[in-house]
Amino acid sequence: MPYEMIALLMFSSMMLMLITGQRVFGAIGFVGAAAALLLWGTGGAEIPFSAAMKLMKWYPLLTLPMFIFMGYVLSESKIADDLYRMFHVWMGPVRGGLAIGTIGLMVLISAMNGLSVAGMAIGATIALPELLKRRYDKIMVTGVIQAGSSLGILVPPSVVLVLYAMIARQPVGQLWLAGVIPGLMMAAMFVIYIYVRCRLQPDLGPALPEEERNVSTAEKLRLLRAGILPLVIFAVMMVPFVNGWTSLVESSAIGAMAAFVAAVLKGRMTKEVFETSLRETLAISCMFMWIILAALGFGAVFDGLGAVKAIEDLFTQQWGLSPWMILVLMQLSFIVMGTFLDDTAMLVIVAPLYVPLVGEMGFDLIWYGVLYTITTQIAYMTPPFGYNLFLMRAMAPPEIGLRDIYISIIPFALVMVLALVLVMVFPGIALWLPDTVYGK
């Protein structure tokens, strides 16, 4: 059997197992191990062993549990509650102000955590009940929570960009900086949409009643200080790294320690908070480790088959596609896969195929990392099986049905598509900041 057919059979077998609900690492690892044994006999057992050794030698992988622990400490210690109260007071008098404040909350949570799931959980449990209680339109605010939570995988310290950096062998610092302006741009586009929509249809997001606006200046300043705390933690972590004073792993440890100290000083580091943060950190870190281990083994078999070269020849020689057409097809494939896979699984499955091809076509891999991240954000919210849609359904109150969730995301998904197009057409949006900081 030609190697191209073997590669296609491997990929289709893996996708079939994923569609039937198998665990991601189990499906990827099983197909990779089975193919290695069938192709090379018992010698194929060296591939998963080699992948395990490679994983253990990835020193930057230590950043994952640090960032995850930092995020859970800040969220479990209810510092996010202070953030929302700050936005509630400062933005309440504006039509749609609480929804706009929720986007601001999501940006700050993203800077604390780097995972979209954490933003979704905090938004659904803290912001959504408050918005519904103040007669905000349930469809619009459901979309606000989902769109805002997606910023977690783009705004640094994005865990997904750390994984992309490891797989694509690109500097994490440059990828983080590349995500800053696109992430803030997307947040600003969400805010503009909410503001304009609520100006045209005031019943969707009424301003706060007069009695709730009467908050003393001292209380406003106290809440503002509470909202600045996550930014201080972010600066304490990022400034030494960007200036080259610390390594990525050292900066992640500084961030985790700063979050822990902040929770202790505010008197919120209880035994329950500490145990929950450790337990969740261990669970998510182990999940990432298993997926990466399986993906490394699968990718090694693919490389051995020459699948990357075969796909490149198919696109450029047989089909005669231009580099830009190939890039668009890649982004569309992410959106399709995103209907039933999370961002990490998509990355580790297709990165061995796409990243070398993108480099061969002459595109910047830092820029492509931002494109991948924005595309997976869109895929997360694309009906009928977007990952975030079902997370939202699990967390939303009973009065919000699946139909409401599907409808709510349409305008925000269109805004994200516009942001993706802007970054594709104007690469400087993503590359200007890392080029400026690193002096390219």
Image (cartoon, helix red, strand yellow):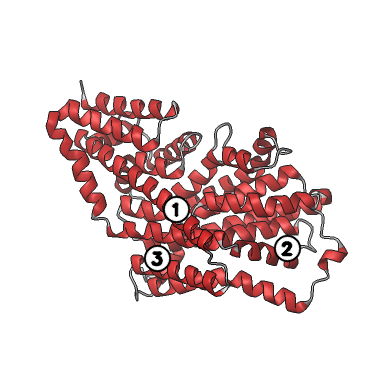
**Relative to 396, 371 lies left or right:** left
Quick check: 154 left or right of 198?
A: left
Of tags 1 and 2, which is closer to the observer? 1
Q: Position of residue 215 (x, y in %)?
A: 80, 72
> Label 2's element?
helix
The residue that label 1 is drawn on is 279
Residue 423: x and y in percent read: 50, 53
Tell me, yes or no, if residue 367 can be seen here.
no
User: Disc 3 marks which amino acid?
Assistant: Ser
Label 2 environment density (alpha carbons within 10 Å; few <14, some 14–19, many ≥20): many
**Label ID, residue 252:** 3
Q: Amino acid at mark 1?
A: Arg
Q: Nearer the viewer, residue 33 or 358?
A: 33
Spatial CA distance of label 1 from label 2 is 31 Å
Q: Is residue 407 above or below residue 65?
A: above
Q: Are marks 2 and 3 in contact (CB under 8 Å)?
A: no
Residue lying at the far front in this picture: please name it: 271
**Horizontal and vertical percent position of residue 424:** 48, 50
- Where is mark 2, residue-wise? 88
